[in-house]
Image: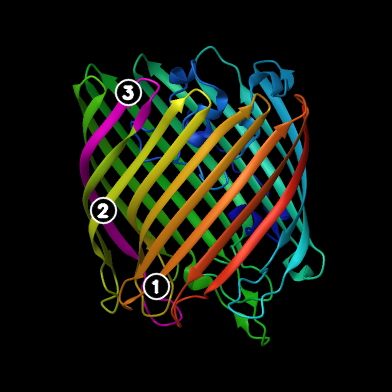
Amino acid sequence: MQGLAGFSRFGAGAFGVCLLAVLAAPVHAQTAIDSQNFSTSAPDPKRQSNTSKVAAEIGDGDDRATSDDRQRVDDRYQPKGVELGKFLFLPDVMTAGGYNSNVYTTTNNAKSDLFARVVPSFRLQSRFDRHALNLSGEAEKIYYRRYTSDNVLNGRLYADGRYDLFRGTEITGQASYYAEHEDRGSPDAVNGQYPTPVFGNRQFLAGKHTEGPWLFSADVSRHQMIFKDVPGDNGVIIQNQGRNRTEYRASGRVGYELIQGYYALGQVSGNIRDYNLPVDYNGVDRSSRGYAAQGGVGVDLSQLIRGDFLVGYFKQDYNSSTLQNPSGLAVRAVFNWTPDKQTLIVPSLERSVLESTTAGASSMVRTALTALVRREIQRNLVGSIFGGVYYDAYEGLGKSTWTYEGKISTTYAFNENVYTGADIGYRQRNAPVGVSNSYSQLIGMIRLGVRM
């Protein structure tokens, strides 16, 4: 549902150069890149030869709630694209009509409305014998029938790829730029006359190497976010510069195969969260540094199950002495289970520290439990069910929120060029006063798309 509410009023003008690319490395599929690499749960195309496309593994960078099923139908229903030398150009235009039961995600007096959505997109995909270099982008326009203040435009552009150094060793990378709006239901969203515009860019570089029973990997990333001011209902400008920041992260991982299909894993990571302003509008310096160390087991059992379970310790230290420093149990478990060739089941559990600009709180310590079930009902029909429960503890406030969400999605391909689908999702947040809004929201839509 985030794709429905992350709209940008000003996105068109920001669709600029985001590509310098790929950190000089040819780059691989986007879904495999923004991960904690190396994870035994990272997608491995070589393992998919005996399964349908619907059972292709989910990577750490995927949004499991909204992952697009257009690419999951059988190969005979996939577009052929336009050949451009060593590249394949794949354009797509998707239109949708839908209903939002609570446009402003308010606790009371919810405002419902009908909306239309238009999403033109493209992918330029390499077809090299070795390595990979891809470019993709999309624009997203949302029109509401009554509440036109939420009519917005998004833009996103990605370059990604892979460089194969030699057998067992590869480098992957990604550069991306986006101009969109913050989800009205975000814990940090402000109650502006329209959703908060957000501009950002990400860079990611990772490498992995296998040597006999040993697995080694490392990655570095940078994510810059700019939140624009918005007018409030009372005419006062809501200033968001205090939220602008750049986040850096680096991690390393090592694994050793104890017996066939079972690995001992260890991972350490560090981060820097650097806010642009020395202090926010409450006079607080929110910049911080943190780390996490985890160990556990990984599983890689043929076509049946692949994933890992890690447990350890995290700590985040904030520059301001008025902010409480969170620390405690770090958990990360993600598994890709394929009980048959047409079914994928992905349960996950994670506990980590997220940023929050709620007054008096340093951060949110989130515990997230999610599950995705995706099945090929027919060669040209794919269905998905997603569910998630999120517990957010606001460090320093002694308050917490519970959020529940679920989504059912279907995609039907008439042929290689025309497809349709339907989605219905529900989200509910229970929050105490002074933290964020309690609300419930139902979003449903019907999609129709054309591609080449």
* Residue that extends furthest to the right in the rendered view of this protein: 145
**Front tag of 1 and 3:** 3
Q: Quadrant of residue 209?
A: top left
- Residue nearest the viewer, comparing 67 with 411: 411
- Residue nearest the viewer, comparing 394 with 363: 394
Q: Which mark sits nearer the N-terminus, 2 or 1? A: 1
Q: Quadrant of residue 338?
A: top left
> Distance from label 2 to label 1 (Cα)?
29 Å
* Residue that extends furthest to the bottom in the rendered view of this protein: 234
Quadrant in which the C terminus is drawn: top right
Rendered position, 332 above or below 128: below
Please say whether residue 28 is visible from this viewpoint: no
Q: Secondary structure at mark 3?
A: strand
Tell me which segment is drawn in magenta: 279-306
388 relative to 72 in the view: left or right: left
Q: Quadrant of residue 337?
A: top left
Quadrant in which the N terminus is drawn: bottom right
Amino acid carrying label 1: it is Pro
> Distance from label 1 to label 3 (Cα)?
50 Å
The residue carrying mark 1 is 278
Callouts 1 and 3 close, C-beta under 8 Å: no
Q: Which residue is depicted at the point 58% across and 68% down? A: 440
Amino acid carrying label 2: it is Ala
Rendering coords of residue 112 (x, y %): 72, 69
Q: Residues within 10 Å of mark 2 (few under 14, many from 20)?
A: many
31 relative to 327 in the view: left or right: right
Rendered position, 301 above or below 353: above
The residue carrying mark 2 is 330
Q: Secondary structure at mark 2?
A: strand
The disc label shown at residue 301, or none: 3
